[in-house]
Image (tube, helix red, strand yellow):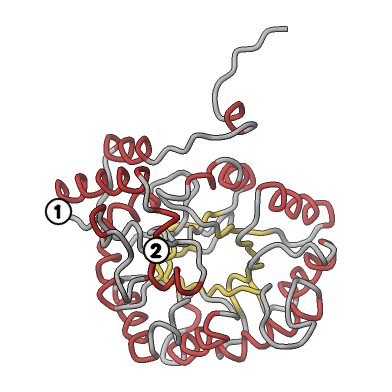
Amino acid sequence: MEYRYLGRSGTTVSELCLGAMTFGREADEADSRRMLDLFADAGGNFIDTADVYGEGASEEVTGRWLKGRDRDQWVIATKVRFPSGPGVNDVGLGRKHIVASIDASLRRLGTDYVDLYQIHGWDRATPLEETLSTLDALVTAGKVRYLGASNLVGWQLQKMLDVSRAAGYERFLTLQPQYSLLARPTEWELIPVCEAEGLGVLPWSPLRGGWLSGRYTRDMGGAPDGSRVKTAEEQGWSETWAAYDNETTWSILDELRAIADARGASVAQVAIRWVLQRPGVTAPILGASKLSQLEDNLGVVGWTLSGEEMARLTAVSEVTAPYPYDASMRDIATSR
């Protein structure tokens, strides 16, 4: 396992982050602990969770596991934004909810500080100054070491950075966006903002809900029972069969399989490796529900895709950008 700086900070994290969304939900506590042990043994030191994962169970499982570890050797990230209870103030990025949420997360995690506290999305109802000043106060109080964001669009991220800079608040250090061979529009604004502002990129769903794991083939005709995609159809999640059963997806998978076969690697490893080697990326987040999945995913370390292999995958997954991105992403000859 290699290590990278977390944005423009002096803190280093493993090149892979273990996502704990499945803990206490798809994975019971025993399996979750085995995955945490495996990740630790592989050299990982970076865990990402959220207050709403498993209605708090993810943080609780992670916290109980941490009790047997040296806390200071771990970088723990969690999030705030979505409903954490039935009350009208149990949601959003207002001061009342943020302050209550960080205290609840700290209790569940069994720690007195969180290394990376991330807003889980945009809250149009709360003034930015209220959100950002509250987050800044958490850093001052020592409850939070660094701040980050997730699930924003480009203008939202830039505006929050600008307001923080103007007011002298602690700025976001990272962005956690969806990013994979099947989620390339992240490159149109978000990654350029991160590169310009020095934010580390922590991609979630580098396998796009299992679509890039190699499990699915053209001839299936539908998602098999028990699969993540089948669950997505039942739960109304975005990675459904109908959404991705198209020539673009199958062409990407064909290229992944060709490279994986030549490499002696798995399809999932090649897909994650592409994300890991993309500009601006600090650490893709691995979300596994089974130990075998994590074992395979961890095989991504210790080797690299060649420039030619990266180019092949980049070309086959290229998305035609709509206006105005089509203009901003190519060189335009102008005269005055």
Tell me the residue at 55%/60% (across/down): 176
Badge 2 local density, few (<14 within 10 Å), some, or many (20+)?
many
- Quadrant of res 7: bottom right
Whether residue 220 sits left or right of residue 44 in the image: it is left
Residue annotated with mark 1: 264
In the displayed structure, 275 sits above or below 189; it is: below
Q: Residue 241 falls in which quadrant of the image?
A: bottom left
Q: Is residue 22 above or below residue 220?
A: below
Q: Tell me, for residue 29, which label it has, or none.
A: none
Q: Residue 93 location, x and y as percent?
A: 75, 71
Q: Is residue 105 left or right of residue 166?
A: left
Measured from the top left, where is residue 244 in percent x and y? 40, 53
Task: Tell me if mark 1 has few (under 14), some (14-19) or many (20+) residues whose alpha carbon lies within 10 angstroms of its own.
Answer: few
The answer to which of 137 and 62 lies nearer the viewer is 62
Q: Is residue 198 left or right of residue 57?
A: right
As shown in the figure, which amino acid type bears the numbered disc 2? Leu
Residue occupying the point 32% across, 76% down: 226
Name the residue type under label 1: Gly
Task: Identify the residue position indicated by label 2 in the image.
Answer: 16
Residue 106: % across, % down:
62, 86
